[in-house]
Amino acid sequence: MEIVNFKVCLFYLTALVAVTSGGKMKIVEEPNTFGLNNPLVSQTSRLQAKVSPSPVSGPPHLHRLAGKCFNYIEATYKYVFCPFHNVTQHEQSFRWNAYSGILGIWHEWEIENNTFTGMWMREGDSCGNKNRQTKVLLVCGSSSKLAGVSEPQTCVYSLTFETPLVCHSHSLLVYPVLSEKLQKEWDEIAQSRYEELITEQGYNKLLKELFEEAGFLRKAQQQKAEESVTSVSHPSLEQCTQDFEKQRTEIERLQSLLKQHNISYEATADRTEDRGYTEPSPVQDQHLRGDGGFIADLH
């Protein structure tokens, strides 16, 4: 018993000497989860999506991938691809500020020549004056897995995803996936292009609208609405208060200008409150446009 205790004491004494004398002890690294699980980290430091993922779409046989995630480790980074959801990156280190972030949220398909050529994951974490985004390329493989990651452009990533679900030559064709109604519309669009009733540019525009209706592409109106919602959000109460003060100052400045020119703004405010809006006169419409023309010219 005394021999065992002596060995234990000798071990700790050796370790203490190694540390105090500048010696290094080997530490086994494990994946960093500080930014994900630590309750002391503020919410803004955790993984937070800017927008919601688009609905599951595309070839029905690929829908079974929804709800699954696939990992890929390269150097000190771990990438996680969750089809029809998002792509994330996690730095595998013990640095206090190790990066864990979103590289893209499921957005839409890339379509070329009647083929689904890739999955676009957009609206990821901020990167300078833009957001990170990722294109996922689907290639034939014996099993479903992430096979490679690259960054061809700054903050634009490319993932290669292997799966046996795309090995058939027709597995990524667009036309068979469309409803009967949309297939008929595509036939009519193609016929019009063949008869040169529409230009190539017009043909591509009509196809884009058709793919949007099918849910393969994100509609432009939907993107603008999300951008509008994002633009009015505030990261903190302090920022919200500052913005409110700026707006109040601007309103006071505009009211002062109206008074200087003997223009009453109170009557307009009353009309707005009573009716919920103010209908501009045709003369006001011209000035609002700023070009001296009539609104009807736009239609």
Image (cartoon, helix red, strand yellow):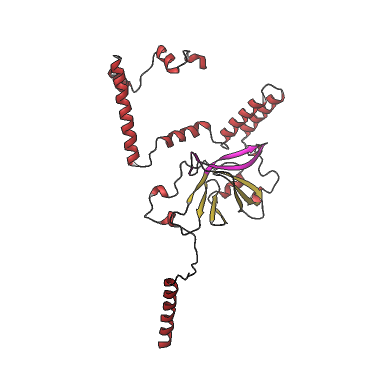
Q: Nearer the viewer, residue 116 or 230?
A: 230
Magenta-span inclusion, residue 192? no
Query: Residue 268, can we see it?
Result: no
Against 225, residue 50 (above or below) is below
Instruction: Report if residue 130 lies within the magenta region.
Output: yes
Q: Main secondary structure of the magenta part?
A: strand
Q: Along the horizontal axis of the image, is 192 left or right of 236? A: right
Locate the N terminus and report the quarter of the image it occupies. Answer: bottom left
Query: x and y percent of residue 3 in the render?
Result: 43, 87
Residue at horizontal 29 percent and vertical 16 percent from the top: 260
Examine the rendered structure and indicate whether residue 84 appears above or below residue 256: below
Image point 64% across, 55% down: which residue? 143
At x 41%, y 78%, the residue is: 13
Seen in the image, is 59 located left or right of residue 10?
Answer: right
Q: Residue 246 vs residue 180: left or right?
A: left
Q: Which residues are magenta?
A: 105-131
Horizontal and vertical percent for residue 174?
64, 38
